[in-house]
Amino acid sequence: MNLGFISTRLAGSDGVTLETIKWAEVCRKLGHQVFFCAGQVAPELQPQRVIPEAHFTHPNIAAIQTACFGVRTRRPEVTEQIHEIRQRLKVALREFITQFQLDVVIPQNILTIPMNLPLGLALTEVLAETGIHTIAHHHDFYWERQRFMVNGVGDILDAAFPPNLPNIKHVVINSVARRDLAQRKGVPSSLIPNVFDFENPPPAVDEYSQDIREQLGLQPDDIFVLQPTRIVARKGVEHAIELVRRLRDPRVKLVVSHSAGDEGLSYYQWLRDLAQAEGVDMRFVANRVNETRQFDEHGRKIYTLWDIYPHADLITYPSLYEGFGNAFLEAVYFHKPIVVNRYSVYMLDIEPLGFETVTMDGYVTDEVVEQVRQVLRDEARRKRMAERNYAIARQHFSLTVLRRRLRNLLATAEPTPDDGELV
């Protein structure tokens, strides 16, 4: 079949993009053709159609977001603008479907989190009008984000985030979302967790990446603690700072790999001031990390996150909330010990499987600090932890798991003569 992946952005290292790529690769191996549509699409994702107003950073969409969230009502002219853009997006989405003769569309989070209200409405109407088979992949719902709680678009959220239509099969990434979707919308869903290619070992350090510690200013005997996430408040990076402070070892360096993203700079500035006040050597290296290897304008190497992981001694993952936990799986993939906060999805969907980590319950305790010290000085223990965790992840979060579940979903999506026609 011809499958169309639709999102606001399919580029970069965000979780939605990464999981979309994995889904697309598996679908290709199952014999299907895949196509991509978004406001921004990475060049390597082909064939593709770019719709600029589908991107959440488009000026028109950003203005609508400002006018609709953090308020209780919206102005009439905002409603008019939403529907003007909705109509344009409907035309573009229909053209995408007809251009590639799609049998199934797979919306990636655009019917889940309201980063682009007109796009959610437009796609909902296209799905209702055509009846095309749809697998809606939900990563994080609006009710899981505090910034969307106060809004003037309750009618739109009810209608399209997500819609309840008979031609949509809903897929969530954790059991909490599955429960909440059923309770809030009366919508059943399948659970497909985030996955990783655990059938194949991670790439080894090569000539290009062997100098990373030196390039980041680390000494040979420094202890490299990596926080491999964006700088947003729900990542709980302040707990990583607290951990490093309490280790009281000047060799420990905290390295944060990503930038602040789309939620502003205030949290980043607070973290920087906190680390300075606590005497923690914290290094923000987002300007040295990208999706591809390259050189910057000063001739310095730019590395991928996968280049950096092998050099780390410890991974901190003190998130307050996660839809699933890509960084957790990455740390397991690279055989690294992990300090993880027991966020709700971790407790329900990951921890019961038997992973061996250093865990914290919302704050850093003396016991957590002592466990980290033991892990850092006991190489044999680190190896045992890594091997155990990798084996568990391979069983539960591999591409084989995704392949089996997607095959089952797509088996019921064969086109039928009764499907709606595009007009």
Image (cartoon, helix red, strand yellow):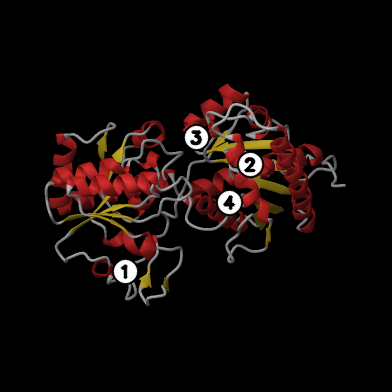
Q: Earlier in the sequence, mark 2 or mark 3?
A: 2
Tags 3 and 4 in contact by the CB under 8 Å rule?
no
**Placement of 160 over or under 288, stated as above or below:** above
Question: What residue is drawn where x is 54% and y is 58%?
Answer: 11
- As drawn, the label of residue 64 is 2
Measure the C-alpha gap from mark 3 to mark 4.
16 Å
Q: Earlier in the sequence, mark 4 or mark 1?
A: 4
Q: Amino acid at mark 3?
A: Arg
Q: Earlier in the sequence, mark 3 or mark 4?
A: 4
- As drawn, the label of residue 57 is 4
Read off the residue under disc 3. Answer: 147
Any part of residue 201 in sight: no
Is label 3 or label 1 in front?
A: 3
Location of residue 237 in the rendering, given as x and y in whole percent from the top left corner: 31, 44
Measure the C-alpha gap from mark 2 to mark 3.
15 Å
Is label 2 or label 4 in front?
A: 2
Between 123 and 354, the one lying in front of the other is: 123
Tags 2 and 4 in contact by the CB under 8 Å rule?
no
Location of residue 287 in the rendering, given as x and y in whole percent from the top left corner: 38, 63
Q: Earlier in the sequence, mark 1 or mark 2?
A: 2
Question: What residue is drawn where x is 58% and y is 42%?
Answer: 115
398 sits to left or right of 249: right
* Residue found at the very far right of the displayed protein: 423
